[in-house]
Amino acid sequence: MKIDHDKIDEAVLALLWLTLHDGCRAWKSFDWDVTDRLYQKGFICDPANKAKSVVLTDEGLQKAEKLFKALFTRGA
Protein backbone atom coordinates (compact mmCIF):
# COMPACT_ATOMS: atom_id res chain seq x y z
CA MET A 1 0.00 0.00 0.00
CA LYS A 2 1.34 3.44 -0.95
CA ILE A 3 0.66 6.13 1.64
CA ASP A 4 -0.19 9.64 0.42
CA HIS A 5 1.68 11.72 2.99
CA ASP A 6 0.21 14.96 1.62
CA LYS A 7 -3.32 13.75 2.43
CA ILE A 8 -2.22 12.75 5.92
CA ASP A 9 -0.59 16.15 6.40
CA GLU A 10 -3.80 17.89 5.29
CA ALA A 11 -5.95 15.84 7.66
CA VAL A 12 -3.62 16.53 10.60
CA LEU A 13 -3.51 20.24 9.76
CA ALA A 14 -7.33 20.28 9.74
CA LEU A 15 -7.40 18.51 13.11
CA LEU A 16 -4.90 21.00 14.53
CA TRP A 17 -7.47 23.69 13.68
CA LEU A 18 -10.04 21.73 15.70
CA THR A 19 -7.88 21.98 18.84
CA LEU A 20 -6.89 25.65 18.50
CA HIS A 21 -6.53 27.71 21.66
CA ASP A 22 -5.00 31.12 22.38
CA GLY A 23 -5.69 32.11 18.78
CA CYS A 24 -2.98 30.12 17.02
CA ARG A 25 -1.82 27.27 19.29
CA ALA A 26 -2.90 23.65 18.94
CA TRP A 27 -2.06 20.52 20.91
CA LYS A 28 0.79 18.61 19.34
CA SER A 29 -0.31 15.06 19.84
CA PHE A 30 0.35 13.92 16.29
CA ASP A 31 3.12 11.91 14.71
CA TRP A 32 6.49 13.71 14.69
CA ASP A 33 7.05 12.99 11.01
CA VAL A 34 3.79 14.74 10.15
CA THR A 35 4.51 17.78 12.31
CA ASP A 36 8.00 18.00 10.81
CA ARG A 37 6.51 18.01 7.30
CA LEU A 38 3.96 20.67 8.30
CA TYR A 39 6.84 22.75 9.64
CA GLN A 40 8.81 22.29 6.41
CA LYS A 41 5.72 23.40 4.44
CA GLY A 42 5.48 26.57 6.56
CA PHE A 43 2.14 25.79 8.23
CA ILE A 44 3.43 25.56 11.81
CA CYS A 45 6.38 26.93 13.76
CA ASP A 46 9.20 24.58 14.73
CA PRO A 47 7.56 21.76 16.75
CA ALA A 48 10.86 20.59 18.28
CA ASN A 49 10.53 22.19 21.69
CA LYS A 50 9.25 21.36 25.18
CA ALA A 51 5.84 22.98 24.70
CA LYS A 52 2.84 20.65 24.48
CA SER A 53 1.39 22.70 21.66
CA VAL A 54 2.48 24.05 18.28
CA VAL A 55 1.93 27.50 16.83
CA LEU A 56 0.22 27.70 13.46
CA THR A 57 1.50 30.33 11.06
CA ASP A 58 -0.97 32.74 9.43
CA GLU A 59 -0.85 30.58 6.29
CA GLY A 60 -1.31 27.46 8.41
CA LEU A 61 -4.35 28.92 10.19
CA GLN A 62 -6.03 29.79 6.90
CA LYS A 63 -5.29 26.43 5.28
CA ALA A 64 -6.24 24.50 8.44
CA GLU A 65 -9.66 26.14 8.62
CA LYS A 66 -10.29 25.57 4.90
CA LEU A 67 -9.27 21.90 5.17
CA PHE A 68 -11.33 21.37 8.32
CA LYS A 69 -14.44 22.70 6.61
CA ALA A 70 -13.79 20.62 3.48
CA LEU A 71 -13.02 17.38 5.31
CA PHE A 72 -15.22 17.46 8.40
CA THR A 73 -18.38 19.52 7.86
CA ARG A 74 -21.68 18.80 6.18
CA GLY A 75 -23.47 21.03 3.72
CA ALA A 76 -26.44 23.06 5.00
Image: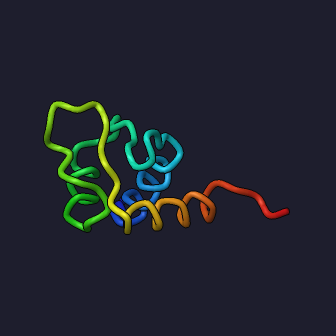
Residue 62 location, x and y as percent? 47, 66
- Quadrant housing residue 1: bottom left
Give the vertical position of 28 relative to 44 (above or below). Answer: above
Q: Nearer the viewer, residue 15 or 51?
A: 51
Q: Residue at x 70, y 56 (%)?
A: 73
8 relative position to 32: left or right? right
Q: Nearer the viewer, residue 6 or 35?
A: 35
Q: Quadrant of the C terminus?
A: bottom right
Residue 48 location, x and y as percent? 14, 42
Residue 2 in sight in this render: no
29 relative position to 11: left or right? left
Residue 72 location, x and y as percent? 64, 54
Q: Nearer the viewer, residue 24 or 17?
A: 24
Residue 8 in sight in this render: yes
14 relative position to 31: left or right? right
Residue 64 location, x and y as percent? 47, 60
- Quadrant housing residue 30: top left
Identify the residue at the far right of this view: 76
Q: Residue at x 63, y 61 (%)?
A: 69
Q: Residue at x 32, y 62 (%)?
A: 43
Identify the residue at the far front of this view: 22
- Quadrant housing residue 61: bottom left
Give the vertical position of 47 relative to 75 (above or below). Answer: above
Q: Nearer the viewer, residue 35 or 8?
A: 35
Q: How is the image coloured?
A: rainbow
Q: Residue at x 34, y 54 (%)?
A: 56
